Image (cartoon, helix red, strand yellow):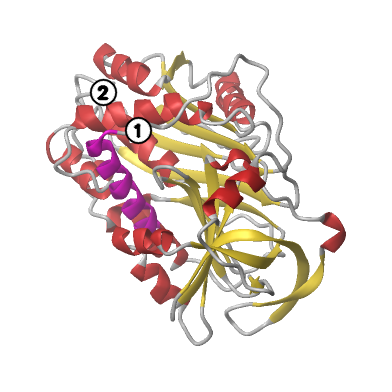
Amino acid sequence: MNRKTTLWIIFATLVLFSSCEKKDIPFDERNLELTAAEKQLVDLNNEFAFDMMAQLSGNITANENLFFSPLSVGAALTMTSNGAKGETLSQMQKALNMDGIDAELVNAYYKKLITDLPYLNAKTNIEIANSIWYTNEFSVRNSFLDMNRNYFNAEISPLDFSNPQALNRINGWVNEKTKTKIPSILDQIPGDVVMYLINAIYFKGAWDYKFDKSKTKKEDFKKSDGEVIQTDFMETEHTFNTASTTDYEAIQLPYTDRKFDMVLVKSKPGKSLDNLKATFQDPAAIKSLVEGLRGTKAKVHLPKFKISYESSLAPMLVSFGMVKPFNVGADFTGITENGGVYISDVKHKAFVEVSEEGTEAAAVTIVGIELTSMPQPQEPIVIRFDEPFLFFIREASSGLVLFAGQINDPTRDATKK
């Protein structure tokens, strides 16, 4: 092949919070059982998530929101790293915070997540899909394809990239895997592209304690630039796990059956949200937050929001030390025998919608058990998320951060280029 060849990685991620339906397929509900080594990988994944948040949030304004999936990014880059060698591989591992970790362990860890996360709760729908698309004239090592088929359940599709229908095939796959919430990921297929690696995640969960739609009303939200806007605030009052320090206020909102949750964090008056994010880059700070959560009767005011986010992650990854994979000297001879390929871009697209929808199922009993040793105040505390805040969607037992975001303006539904 005498033309310049480039390797693209694309991430298409979706998260949708709304009413939830049981899957139509037979369901074998299970727990996420991790070894000690895999629990260490969770901590490393979470550290990567907060490194991403610190970097990406520095590129948004007071009018823009942020939403991304560190799980999606980690999975797709790990798939790609299975074809990297030498310094190219070591830089990718370092950027992912996985340097010094055995590659087989990392692959097996992702296989467990992909296999088990969708089956933790029949009332929460998680779907994780991976695919590799390559042009017919590009010779790909079978060992690379087999490894990603085995560990990531990747769908393998050789295509004629010069055929206009190839674009429709790839976009159609993304549209299907994200339940039409991300209808396309590509505008065109450039002539020098020989491969796409795509990860898509879909999440549909219901609140354990739903918000009463009749109580949703307009309230003030103060942006970081001082502007005050009006937006729809939801309201609910229950016993939730909350935490309060001199720097922040936090609450844990569980999804049905408590296998997943959303943790929301806001700075205390006079404290900086940026400093808070920097603090959370230390995994010990996150553990301290979670361990500090205590059952408290609370009235929560949370704005409804919907976010579409799109960005190139290449600058961020380069700042993490992943330089060689983006240059012509990259060593991806694990993908193709002749090498000569490099990553031209990493694109991430995500969607999230948070509303009042949810269900009440076995939650009161669970909360009651959790709170048997906690005396309750006569009046509930009031937590208002009426200034910029952070939120994280986690697998509850491990604490693995699946998705993360920052809300600066809940009225804005726009895409970050």
Quarter of the image where one finds residue 40: top left
Q: Looking at the picture, which amino acid does disc 1 mark?
A: Leu
Tell me, yes or no, if residue 335 can be seen here. yes
Q: Main secondary structure of the magenta part?
A: helix
> From the viewer's perspective, is residue 129 above or below residue 303?
above
Which residue is denoted by mark 2 in the rendering? 335
Task: Examine the rendering and report whether any part of residue 4 can be seen.
Answer: no
Closest to the observer: 384 or 74? 384
Task: Look at the picture and state if 132 lies above or below 65.
Answer: above
Q: Is residue 375 left or right of residue 337?
A: right
Residue span colored magenta: 35-52
Q: Which badge, 2 or 1, comes first in the chain's sequence?
A: 1
* Other residues around mark 2 within 10 Å, as few (<14) / some (14–19) / many (≥20): many
Q: Which residue is mark 1?
A: 7
Q: Secondary structure at mark 2?
A: loop
- Label of residue 390 in the image: none
Q: Are marks 2 and 1 in contact (CB under 8 Å)?
A: yes
Q: What residue do we see at 50% from left, 31% from top? A: 189
Q: Residue furthest right?
A: 214
417 with respect to 343 (left or right): right
Q: Which residue in the rendered view is the most extreme toward the bottom?
A: 270
Q: Tell me, yes or no, whether the highlighted magenta stretch contains residue 40.
A: yes
Secondary element at tag 1? strand
